[in-house]
Image (cartoon, rainbow, N blue to C red):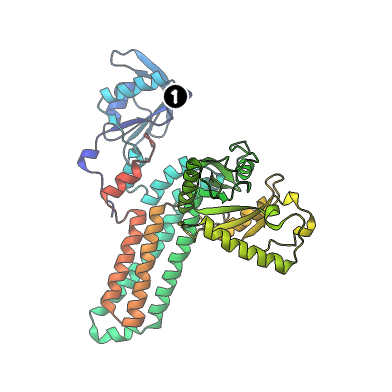
Amino acid sequence: MNQGPAVSDLATIVAEATPAGRGGVGIIRLSGSGVCNIGKTLVGHLPAKRQVETRVFRAADNSVIDQGLVIYFQGPASFTGEDVLELHGHGGPVVMAMLMQRCIELGARQARPGEFTERAFLNNKIDLTQAEAVADLIDSASQAAVRNAVKSLQGAFSERINGLVVKVTHLRTFVEASIDFPEEEEDFLADQNLIDQLEQMMAEVISILSNAKQGVILQEGLQLVLVGEANSGKSSMMNLLSGQETSIVTEIPGTTRDVIKENIVLDGIPVRVLDTAGIRDSIDPIEREGIRRTVKSIEQADAVLWLIDWPAEIGQGQVLSQDALRAFMHARLIDLRRVLFKGADLEKPLVVILNKVDLLDSTHLLGDAPEPDTVYFSTKTGQGLSEMMAVLKEKLGLDIHPEGLFSARRRHLLALKVASEHLQLAFQRLTEESAGELMAEELKCAQDALGEITGKVRSDELLGKIFSGFCIGK
């Protein structure tokens, strides 16, 4: 169970809850046991709880700092679970700084990043996945990411984890109780219902993990690398996807020497596109360094778009049958893969883009693309863009519209994988070894791994890492 905040954390905290800079409205937020005393000194008597009233904000010499709205939330019926006061003043940076300084003079201290949300977690107002969803909602780069963050904030992710924890705990309790009666252990280890329950739990973890992977992609974004030989159209593809002339496009091979990056939203998915140096033999040390960085980008990518100058590959005057085209393409891909992925991860999701098809006549485009996961494309006209995204999402197992999605983070994926591994080991202990005690231990490890997701099992180091990435004032 979550503990209350440590004694050192009980100080009243204050922070500006609105972004720094000039604005029509600026909000100062306070939380803690000293809120009432600070508020009464600063604005006179406080309004009734959850009521909005206009007040004058006064300095130590009783001069007026500003005039604005005051809202008082009495704990525990507040976001943090403590007394909370919000001062809505005019959003000038000097005004906000004067109000902040006055609150500190009256006994508050500057809040750490994420400390308001951290107190909400420590006071059992929200769990850890909901706390993280607050930051995810603020940082969302697409509408789909916003929807998923809201679902997590409302408890969709937590409910699935907590429901699974209940099942694992129930099964573990049953196993441990049965171990205490050796004469019954053989019977319960052979119980088909026990096997069925474990299989259902393993399937549920895999289902949650699949949704969480998609949640991570939609929240953190997809890193997509454009690779290919020189003059295959990578820079034109970058400009098409970004909607602006991000990369220089010329007929001179080797124009792109470094990795060029652009953040975009593509088909509802936040994407970081990397345009890389063309793969070719070169004695130019700068171009060779660019190619080395290309390989490094491939290793770090979530997926790869491999562009091929299709007219140059098949020849303008050559007409191939469907079977001959497929055989040619298959052999060429093997050759290019060997050159391109030298030293890099071969298992990356890969979409092959047969580019510049606008330069070919219909005799060279024989129905569907000749190999799986390949798309006919034109960076000049945009032909093939929807097909490319369909293949890419299929390769990633990504569907941005299902009801079961929620925002997630990479630490959640790790915890789910650990839980899945322990459940599989528990299944092995049961079905292959008939080892009840070992099975119970694996179930405990799975339960602990799931508990790390919601914060029921937690460490101060984990909390510090999570909340340090929050905005100050949130």
Percent position of residue 288, x then y: 49, 45
Please determine whether, in this image, residue 22 is positioned above or below residue 392: above
Please determine whether, in this image, residue 311 is positioned above or below residue 21: below
- Which residue matches tag 1? 21
Q: Quadrant of the N terminus?
A: bottom left
Please determine whether, in this image, residue 320 is positioned above or below residue 388: below
Q: Nearer the viewer, residue 298 or 257?
A: 257
Percent position of residue 326, x then y: 68, 66
Q: Is residue 290 visible?
A: yes
Q: Quadrant of the C terminus?
A: top left
- Residue extending furthest toward the right: 362
Residue placed at 72% from the left, 52% from the top? 357
Q: Nearer the viewer, residue 128 or 87?
A: 128
Left or right: 461 as drawn, with respect to 389: left
Residue placed at 34% from the left, 82% from the top? 432
Percent position of residue 318, x then y: 76, 59
Q: Is residue 127 visible?
A: no
- Location of residue 90 by image quarter: top left
Q: Nearer the viewer, residue 277 or 137?
A: 277
- Location of residue 204 by image quarter: bottom left
Left or right: 312 as drawn, with respect to 42: right
- Location of residue 443 by image quarter: bottom left
Inspect the image, locate mark 1, and give the three-letter code of the amino acid beneath it. Gly
- Residue extending furthest toward the front: 283
Percent position of residue 360, x then y: 76, 52
Left or right: 363 as drawn, with respect to 470: right
Disc 1, SS: loop
Residue placed at 30% from the left, 25% from the top? 103
Task: State how many labels appear.
Answer: 1
Q: Nearer the viewer, residue 402 or 214?
A: 214
Instruction: Specify few, some or many for label 1: CA neighbours under 10 Å numbering under 14, 14-19, or 20 or more.
Output: few
